[in-house]
Image (spheres, rainbow, N blue to C red):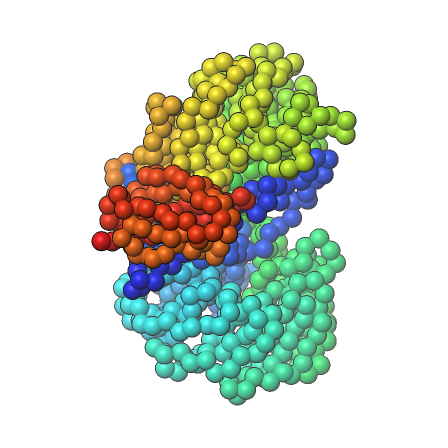
Amino acid sequence: MKLFFTGFLLMFLSFSALAQNNFILNQKVPQAGEFIENTPSSPEQNKYSKGELGYDSLGMSFQGNWPLGSANNIISSITGDTVFIASGGGVIILDITNPETPQVISEVYARAYVDHLHYDYASQQLYLAAYFSGFEIWDLADITNPSRLSRTPTDALPRGGIYSYQDHLYIITVSGGLLVYDISDPANPNYVTTTSISGSAWNFYGKDNFLYIQTNNAMRLYDLSSPSAPILRDSYGGSPKGIYVKDDLCYIAESSALVITDVSNPDDIVFVGNLAIPGSAYDVVVIDGFAYVANNWYGGSEGGIYAIDVNDPANPIQADFYNSYFRAISGEDSKVVAINNEGYCVFDVSTPGQLDISTIEGLPGSLTDVALKGDYAFTGSNGFRVFDVNDISKPQQVAFLDIIGSALDISGDILAYIPESMGAGNRLSIMDISDPENPNEMGYYNNISLSQDAIIQGDYVYVGGWWDGFTVFDISDPTNPSFVTKEHNWSSSALPGEEWCYVSDLAVYGNYLYLIDYKPFEDDDTKGLYTFDISDPENPVLISRYKQQSQQSWRIKAHSNYVYLADAYGGIEIIDVSNPETPITVAYQELIDVAYNLDLANGYAYASCYINGGVQAVDVSDPENPFLEGFYQKSGLFALNVTANDHDIYIADGGSGFQIYGHDAVHTAIEESILYAETIAAFPNPSQGILQVQMEGASELVIFDQTAKAVRKTTLEEGVNTLDLSDLPNGVYFLKFKLEDHISLRKIVISR
């Protein structure tokens, strides 16, 4: 167990999982009759700060991962022939000597989402700012075979940047300042000091002994001449997104402009010139008198790359434009590389100011599901991907098909594959995986309106479609899937709850289909667990609607006479459906984290957890008496789904690929990971067991010990409440507040 204290200052985090009922974990969902276009997201900037970032577990262990995901940052070598792309929780190293045929040199698999990276050419070391992992140092002396030298947790998320200078490493955290480490021994970094940064820091540029840090309201220039004691020299106000420095000029990609400043006097940054840019300017690089600005505006004429003549920096002029959208850009000599959610583009700029496209290549994206068969794992991540996981320490991709999807289900040698989409025009693919390394799409069905999941049962596939109910497809001829029926779908005259609902998820067991609706919109009376008889798949019959399930249960699995619900308020609910006409809740297991999804295997319910990432194992061998038996925290980012087999647990980690865990012997207890609760005050802290808890609204309170076991449950009223915990032994405890529209955690210490 790793616990981090600074005197009696206890750090805690904020989290609003459910800002409104029609949002699950900040994901907007469409009301009946509406669609939401699937648009690329910006780099994953979770605003929530974390405490100590080590990994802790109870009865579970990390086995391996494939952490690649959407490109979120990029740097170039000094010659421009090698580029390093931060791809989810890894780094893809490319040789672009021939820009028309880039070659992968190697891949780096970090333990968490890589926000920033820096390469030191003298030491041949790669430095990664890696979210939950802290920072990692990799040896690239043999660039074809990178090896990790060290991984160091940090006290705050290192999401602002990472830079090395004279045997010192500078870690820029969002709100915890500039951390300085001595890396003269890169295998054993030593903490030196922390320098404060005004504002939230999200990006940087380093050159020689100067570090330019982008905060939410200014660019701040730090002098590293004394490596162990950075000094703030000056600040320049604005809303910088990306920074590049060449000679004595600093080029700033503002939200809607390129701003050029003179930094020849670091104590007095001076405005030189600017050029308005429509859309959302995100990053910039300068080569041979031209600035290339990446614009992240999606879906219009504004986004893309702007080539801007800056030979007269007081009067920049647009010279060329390439329409797309890009979040980061880098380059040297005659090549520029830009990245977006789909992958990367290489441009030939040997004619200065002229953007000539050399190649467009795809990269992995966000991953929300994993399906397993034998020694193979199947995923959708900017395409259909198959992995050999015989060696789970480092899965190897063995097949790829350019077919978009995310949710998967396997039956024998057939796999159903469909996007998780709130938009229209979705494609259900039926994949032949009899030879996993040579899969093929046997058949498909196009133009499905909304799709949440697909489940194979016999010769049929059941697709959940949000307000469009569920659709049944006949796949007895898998080369030609055919529509059978659509049930419980919205129409303007249909009655909510009786004739339609929001299908957040569905499960099938035996002759029954189960739908779950968490009532995303207050005006629509749709909440419930809906049970359908599908003994005749072509004529499903609604048997019952159970309205009493927990408030935010939105994912479901079924086995035998029970259904299991993942509650976004932090728990697993178990409902007895042995009599499908009268379901009844028989158990509710509190969890310390949001249950984003769940799976069942070997008498356990495994919950993927969103706040801290990771997985919790609940023993459900007696479904009416569940108990928490193990956990692993944290994963690489946000654990969006979980798939378990007889041996291992796979976490679909969103933008950070997938992680693999084993369910084994006890290791350590829960780590310090607490949530800021700005509207909640608990004092004194530490205490002898009597606390005053001040609330801005009523709340249900669940108290967990260090093993994540719930030890007390009570309710609190608005105002000041007295909490008597004097009967609990000394130790660290976690308070989980269930507020009206979100949950918040707070760590306390009882010490007598």
Residue 392 on image: x %, y %: 36, 39
Q: Which quadrant of the view contains residue 332?
A: bottom right
Residue 502 as seen in the image, left or right of residue 97: right
Q: Which quadrant of the view contains residue 456?
A: top right
Compared with 275, 329 (above or below) is above
Residue 348 as seen in the image, left or right of residue 662: right
Q: Nearer the viewer, residue 558 or 423?
A: 558
Residue 610 at least partly seen: no
Residue 711 at least partly seen: yes
Residue 189 on image: x %, y %: 30, 66
Identify the residue shown where x is 67% and y is 40%. 30
Residue 248 as seen in the image, left or right of residue 375: right
User: What is the total number of numbered labels drawn onto the structure image?
Assistant: 0
Compared with 731, 544 (above or below) is above
Identify the residue shown where x is 49% and y is 78%. 221
Compared with 559, 258 (above or below) is below
Identify the residue shown where x is 43% and y is 62%. 158
